[in-house]
Image (cartoon, helix red, strand yellow):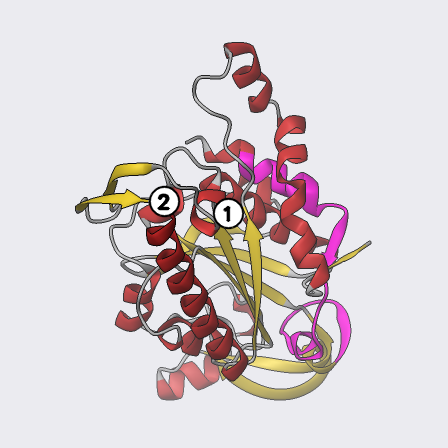
């Protein structure tokens, strides 16, 4: 899919909101907002390890010369909150015939716009086989960010288990995912919560994933592994599926509480069937139509105090 229109529709939606910044996020570093911790006044506070993206003018070269350690000086009074958006890049996020991928990208765009309105620096990461910051996807012009493909053959839990991402400390982390992987939620939540001011987990499901309809005999194909399963999707099978999904959600809710994270459920809009008319398909490519289509995604973020109106 062409990810740019979906992301831009999210930017347009998010422009009417700002992030609801928790108190701890006001202890971010290196900005121009009055706060209780570190900033850029003349009042020296402390040192900390250098993180990619820090102002090089704050490196203490004398410490580097003595110890070979890269540290930056912290000063009191001004703060610059940070938002790290971590997008699940596994293939299940780009489920054919659904609007899940476009909805996830729209949420990323909305968060980036709301971060800018809150005076917050933002950066985009991907999680799959590895957890990586998307090169060039940070700064004040998110409309120009390069956008990743959702094609990882591995779930984000695999990347988080393999390495501990170097997220800037005291920032907000938003994880956008369908959460449809069997691993322990703590594998993902523990590194997300480490040193964070807040963690928001935005679960995006397609309608057929959240509440499927009976379709009779079908061949189910795993989009990540290619494994196939012949099944009869009758009410008995769907009742078992719904029970398993409810138990899976309960695991994530419990783990989110234990790690101090906020779990938000977002339902992707119904995808327009491929058999619709060509005129209707062209209309959906217009950004105003996508904005309307994705507008319902923000309601759960407002209810859970992730966003607030300007």
* Residue 12 magenta-highlighted: yes
Viewed as shown, does residue 306 lie left or right of 268? right
Does residue 159 appear left or right of residue 5 in this picture? left
Q: Position of residue 288 (x, y in %)?
A: 67, 28
Callout count: 2
Mark-to-mark CA distance, 2 and 1: 10 Å
Tag 2–tag 1 contact (CB < 8 Å):
yes
Magenta run includes residue 204: no
Q: Is residue 239 above or below residue 149?
A: below
Q: Quadrant of residue 159?
A: bottom left
Q: Residue tagged by mark 1?
A: 104
User: Over which residues does the magenta segment extend?
Assistant: 6-35
Residue density around tag 1, few if under 14, some if 14–19, many if 20 or more, within 10 Å: many
At a point 61% along the width and 81% down the height, the residue shown is: 74
Q: Which quadrant, please, contains the N terminus?
A: top left
Q: Judge from the rendering whether residue 140 lies leftward or rightward of residue 2; answer left or right.
A: right
Numbered label attached to residue 135? none
Whole-percent x, y for residue 191 in the image: 41, 76
Mark before the other along the chain sequence, 2 or 1? 1
Residue under the point 32% across and 46% down = 91
Write down the residue under mark 2: 150
């Amino acid at each position: 899919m062409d990810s740019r229109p979906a992301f831009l529709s999210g930017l347009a939606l998010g422009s009417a909101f700002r992030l609801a910044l928790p108190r701890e996020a006001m202890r971010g570093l290196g900005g121009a907002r009055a706060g209780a911790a570190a900033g850029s006044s003349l009042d020296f506070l402390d040192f900390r390890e250098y993180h990619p993206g820090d102002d090089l003018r704050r490196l203490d070269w004398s410490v580097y010369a003595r110890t070979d350690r890269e540290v930056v000086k912290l000063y009191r009074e001004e703060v610059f909150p940070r938002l790290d958006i971590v997008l699940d890049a596994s293939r299940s996020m780009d489920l054919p015939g659904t609007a899940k991928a476009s909805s996830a990208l729209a949420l990323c765009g909305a968060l980036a716009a709301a971060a800018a309105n809150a005076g917050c620096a933002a950066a985009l990461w991907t999680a799959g086989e590895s957890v990586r910051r998307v090169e060039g996807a940070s700064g004040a012009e998110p409309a120009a960010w390069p956008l990743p493909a959702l094609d990882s053959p591995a779930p984000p839990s695999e990347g988080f288990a393999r390495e501990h991402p170097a997220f800037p400390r005291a920032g907000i982390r938003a994880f956008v995912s369908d959460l449809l992987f069997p691993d322990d939620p703590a594998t993902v939540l523990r590194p997300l919560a480490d040193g964070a001011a807040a963690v928001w987990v935005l679960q995006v499901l397609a309608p057929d994933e959240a509440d499927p309809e009976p379709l009779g005999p079908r061949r189910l194909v795993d989009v990540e592994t290619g494994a196939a399963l012949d099944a009869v999707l009758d009410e008995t099978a769907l009742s078992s599926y719904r029970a398993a999904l409810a138990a899976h959600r309960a695991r994530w809710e419990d783990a989110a509480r234990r790690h101090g994270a906020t779990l938000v459920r977002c339902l992707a809009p119904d995808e327009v069937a491929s058999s619709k008319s060509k005129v209707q398909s062209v209309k959906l490519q217009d950004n105003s139509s996508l904005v309307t289509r994705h507008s319902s995604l923000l309601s759960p973020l407002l209810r859970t105090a992730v966003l607030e109106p300007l």
